[in-house]
């Protein structure tokens, strides 16, 4: 808070995340730097913290990061929540991932210099980050993440190309992830009376500026052809990529640009991924080749999907058994397991 809150203070309480989200992000990032305490691997704790706040954020009654506060003390106190702290950190983690950590930190240094011993708001931060990036995409991504309630779910669907059975067609779709699951969007009679049709329609209409990263087994970026790498519509595709030799395509990988000075940072975008059976099967077949953070991310997403009845508990248990077999089969006597 010496920098985020003291040196530069939010213009008003609605931008509290500029204090708490940044302070939380920098605590994890700073402690993990080379020469500080990289052996603590604080990036793992950050990944877990972001995964945990997604549980809170999947409630249909969750609040947005940026919220209107008229000065009522109860509003101010209620804004000191996991959404402000941990989701705020998740949004910052996304921006750092989109820009690259060095460009992002350069923008933050500029922000602190420009508004030192003064006040700033989210819009002013966005202007500076856009200037560093040379486009308005960063502020656009940031705005949807701090203004929209909840978090996105990215559906990944792959089928064999009808014209060329040796290639695959990929289709992506975004929708707000809710812990009530598909029954919510189906307006099921089993929903509690407090859930109205208007709430369902409003959630179904939500769209994010969703930054999409995808890599293959070699860690190479997959050329899906999404304009500027940002999914702004509900659906994109189908797009043809890969062949029957393709091992897998991993969406939203952790640290896709590699590590900084050999130290993992834990950068990824704030959304969950719902792979269909074929795309998930490709990943499970190569699960032991994934890094421990990416393994954790996939397992976390599948567990959340099971909790929300997007998938059956039996499907989740089969998935866990399959990945356990893959991991155990890759280890030799005396080799240590990841601490996830």
Image (spheres, grey):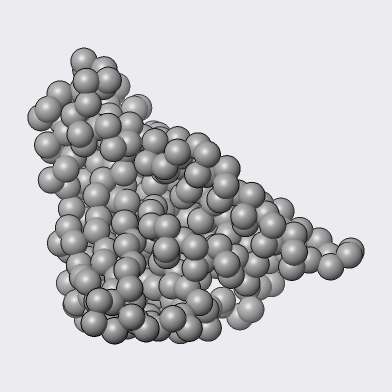
Residue 193 appears left or right of 250: left
Q: Is residue 58 above or below residue 51?
A: above
Pick the residue in front: 166 or 213: 166
Q: Residue at x 16, y 33 (%)?
A: 200
Asked where in the image residue 197 lies, by quadrant, the reply is top left
Task: Point out residue 296 in the picture as x, y percentages from the top left corner.
Answer: 57, 55
Pick the residue in front: 317 or 79: 317
Is there any visible trace of residue 255 in the rendered image? Answer: yes
Q: Is residue 78 above or below residue 110?
A: above
Asked where in the image residue 31 lies, by quadrant, the reply is bottom right
Pick the residue in front: 185 or 165: 165
Q: Residue at x 44, y 81 (%)?
A: 244
Task: Point out residue 246 in the picture as x, y percentages from the top left corner.
Answer: 46, 80
Task: Point out residue 309 in the picture as x, y percentages from the top left corner.
Answer: 39, 36
Q: How many marks?
A: 0
Q: Residue at x 50, y 37 (%)?
A: 313
Task: Point out residue 232 in the picture as x, y percentages from the top left corner.
Answer: 17, 63
Most distant residue in the top direction: 193
Pick the residue in front: 121 or 213: 213
Residue 4 appears left or right of 288: left
Residue 100 appears left or right of 61: right
Q: Residue at x 25, y 76 (%)?
A: 162
Is there any visible trace of residue 83 in the rendered image? Answer: no
């Amino acid at each position: 808070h010496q920098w985020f809150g003291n040196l530069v203070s939010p213009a008003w309480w609605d931008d509290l995340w500029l204090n708490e989200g940044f302070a939380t992000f920098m605590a994890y990032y700073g402690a993990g730097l080379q020469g500080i305490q990289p052996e603590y691997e604080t990036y793992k704790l950050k990944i877990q913290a972001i995964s945990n706040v997604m549980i809170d954020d999947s409630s249909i009654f969750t609040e947005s990061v940026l919220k209107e506060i008229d000065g009522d003390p109860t509003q101010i106190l209620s804004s000191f929540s996991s959404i402000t702290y941990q989701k705020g950190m998740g949004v910052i983690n996304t921006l750092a991932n989109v820009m690259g950590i060095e460009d992002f930190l350069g923008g933050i240094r500029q922000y602190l210099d420009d508004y030192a011993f003064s006040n700033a708001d989210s819009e002013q931060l966005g202007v500076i980050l856009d200037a560093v990036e040379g486009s308005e995409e960063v502020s656009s991504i940031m705005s949807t993440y701090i203004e929209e309630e909840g978090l996105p779910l990215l559906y990944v669907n792959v089928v064999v190309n009808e014209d060329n059975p040796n290639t695959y067609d990929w289709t992506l779709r975004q929708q707000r992830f809710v812990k009530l699951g598909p029954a919510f969007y189906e307006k099921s009679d089993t929903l509690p009376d407090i859930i109205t049709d208007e709430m369902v329609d409003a959630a179904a209409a939500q769209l994010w500026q969703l930054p999409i990263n995808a890599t293959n087994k070699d860690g190479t970026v997959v050329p899906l052809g999404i304009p500027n790498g940002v999914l702004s519509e509900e659906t994109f595709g189908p797009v043809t990529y890969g062949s029957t030799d393709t091992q897998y395509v991993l969406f939203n990988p952790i640290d896709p640009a590699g590590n900084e000075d050999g130290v993992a940072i834990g950068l990824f975008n704030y959304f969950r991924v719902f792979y269909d059976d074929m795309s998930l099967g490709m990943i499970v077949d190569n699960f032991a080749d994934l890094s421990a953070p990416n393994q954790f991310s996939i397992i976390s997403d599948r567990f959340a999907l099971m909790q929300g009845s997007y998938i059956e508990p039996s499907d989740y248990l089969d998935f866990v058994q399959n990945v356990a077999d893959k991991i155990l089969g890759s280890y030799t006597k005396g080799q240590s397991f990841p601490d996830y």
